[in-house]
Image: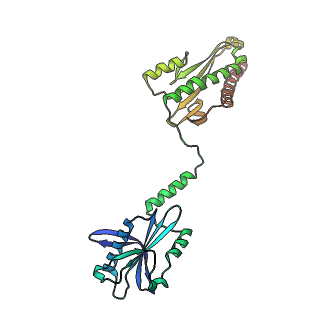
Amino acid sequence: MGRQVHLEKGGQDYYLDLLFYHTKLHCHIILELKIGDFKPEYTGKMNFYLSAFDEDYRTDEDGPTIGIILCKNKNKVTAEYALRDVSKPIGIAEYQLTNAIPEDLKAELPSIEDLEEELEREIEVPKKNVYKKLDDLNSLIEGLDHPEVKEELNIEITKKLFNEILPEVREKVSVLLDPIFKRFTSSIIHYTINSQSSYIGSADLEADLLKTSNIHEIGLNIELNGFKKGGLKSFNRFGGLKFYLGKYKYQIGEYRHKIWEVHLYDKQWSNDDIQQLAEKWTELIIENVAISVKNIGHN
């Protein structure tokens, strides 16, 4: 007859999970679906539904309403019938919870065992819209193929990137660019903190952390001064490698609009990772120097 059938009693609204009418027994059947193990309070609630429904909707042609409570947990489905004690007058009748069906009903109702066996295969529990949407959202989330955020930016992470990763990148770039350094009168690779130059590294970081925990950018800057072969057209070149520190991730690149890599803070840097980053930055510096050399060669 319906699901989530409205029942009003004493000015309160109640909703029956499922309501059927048995045409042979000429009675209504209320089906309550529960997730989890059976609880004693389910009996009282079903008794209330049966009495209230019979009082308002049962006619002289109808038999006493029958209740069925179905409970499903991870491992099994259990079923119980709630039947009125027909030996008592209707006014004082009590509904008894039973897993045995009276002889006169056996031919018309499935046994508890039959119900449990059938429902072990599948039980559809009507869900409120909010729970359905929650399930849909969880399914979408589980379907995502993205690494999970495990750490947020903190002082220790900032120190590790600044004191461990950047020095290794600096050392590898210095080796790669050594032939280029010799082409300039002076060259240096120094650290940066929030776009400010740092020539002593970790000591400057510690000093800044004493003043503020808002370190949002660390990196390296290279200065190539006085291209020797340029003569009168000698030039300087500068370049930066930036780590932009967000709350959940950090970006690496030449500047904010030219990002090469993005990582979560639980990334474990390998020597190959550092070598690849050093080579990426070195290539960019070499390309920029080459552009300047071509410019002075064409003038």
Q: Residue 129 appears in which quarter of the rendering?
A: bottom left
- Can I make out residue 240 in this image? no
Does residue 87 sit above or below 231 in this rendering? below
Residue 131, horizontal then vertical, whole percent: 45, 59
Q: Nearer the viewer, residue 279 or 41?
A: 41
Q: Residue 277 appears in which quarter of the rendering?
A: top right
Residue pictured at 50% horizontal, 58% vertical: 135
Does residue 72 sit above or below 95 in this rendering? above
Does residue 161 sit above or below 8 in this rendering? above
Residue 155, horizontal then vertical, whole percent: 49, 28
- Can I make out residue 241 in this image? yes
Residue 161, horizontal then vertical, whole percent: 57, 27
Q: Nearer the viewer, residue 271 or 298?
A: 271
Can you say which quadrant of the picture contains the C terminus?
Answer: top right
Does residue 153 sit above or below 56 in this rendering? above
Q: Residue 32 appears in which quarter of the rendering?
A: bottom left
Can you say which quadrant of the picture contains the N terminus?
Answer: bottom left
211 with respect to 229 (left or right): left
Q: Residue furthest left?
A: 10
